Amino acid sequence: MRILVSLLGAQGDAVARATALGKLLTARGHSLTFLGDFPENALQEITALPAQALKQVTDQQFDALLVAALGGPDRLAAIARRLPTLVWVQESFLDLMALKGDFVHWVTLFRLARRIVFMTERQKDKTFASFTAGLDDKIVAMASGAPADIAKLRVPTEKEHLGVVMHAPVLPNKRQQDLIAAGERLRDYNLSFTFIGEKQGLAGMPEGMRKIIERHPDRYNFVGYQTASQTRALLAKNELYVHTSSDEAWPQSVIDAAAMGLPLMLSEIEAFSKLWVHGVNCLKFPINNPDFLASSLRMVLQDDVLRNNLSVQAANTAKRFSEQRFYGAMLQMVEGLKP
């Protein structure tokens, strides 16, 4: 089967999942071509499958179209009209509202798709109840899973400082500045902050935040894009995972960090509203409130019992998900897209 995989609009997690799925597909004799703009590391992963990487759609013939993220030109709908299509997106239905002008394009693509996989615990949002009525038999709600042995990566040790880690590209809606501002309120603690993800957006960070980063490069470390294995290795070196996004879908790193037993601190967004419960398997904080985030961090740092309980409950929650099950189901759906 010749498969065109659109990663237009995809960020680190979507790229990592698509390349992992690509390895399984190519091992079974399928031919893959990836469409999108990729960081150099991601491009190396893609071309190592082996697979082609394109900047734009060509006249090549394909047997199926796999759309792995919300993004891309209207021509994807034109391609979908003649190919069996699996739309595989990380976002929930509510995130579609932000697409505005592209919304009609995605409605068209969803109508044409054989299957729609939403990377969320929630299958439907009330806002889209009427829209999904005719699509129910196509929709699959699926959360990604962590490798069975991921907990072995993390070996907690006695350290002079605590490491805090976050995984998201540097974009306004990911709000890394909230964590930096909270960190500045906790200068009496010996903390280090590691930010994983594409960092082209650093130039657009508020000037005050950029100056803090420049003055304290050892405290606030932006490591750029990392592959899935590199990301997991970095997660394992830290003691606390924080996710400050103002909107998000289903970050792989949240499940990975939880499976390792890192206590989680998550912003109060829709994607985390069901699975992650404040005070049980995580702590939550309001968006754009560094003072509240700093207070929560201080509480976790000072209370070893709380930190341990959050660690245990996060790991227990992650056990509900299996990477093997996730990729097995995805493989079955992709191979079920017969022309």
Image (cartoon, rainbow, N blue to C red):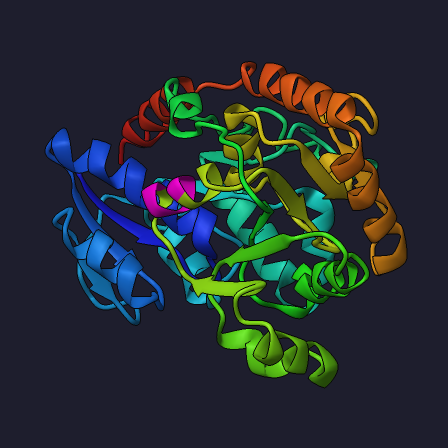
119 shown above or below 71: above
The quadrant of the image that shows the C terminus is top left
Report the residue at 45% width, 57% height from top.
77
Where is residue 331? Give x, y as percent.
31, 27
Q: Which of 164 and 140 is in front in this view?
A: 164
Which stretch is magenta? 229-233
Q: Which of 335 and 113 is in front in this view?
A: 335
Report the residue at 35% width, 68% height from top.
37
Give the image quarter of residue 202: bottom right
Report the residue at 78% width, 24% height from top.
306
Give the image quarter of residue 44: bottom left
Residue 80 falls inside the magenta stretch: no
The quadrant of the image that shows the N terminus is top left
Is residue 45 in sight in this rendering? yes
Where is residue 334? Give x, y as percent.
33, 32
Where is residue 230? Give x, y as percent.
34, 47
Report the residue at 44% width, 62% height from top.
223
Where is residue 130? Give x, y as percent.
78, 37
165 shown above or below 210: above
Is residue 131 in sight in this rendering? no
In the picture, measured across the screen, residue 309 lies left or right of residue 58, that is: right
Q: Nearer the viewer, residue 272 or 293?
A: 293
Residue 230 falls inside the magenta stretch: yes
The secondary structure making up most of the magenta span is helix
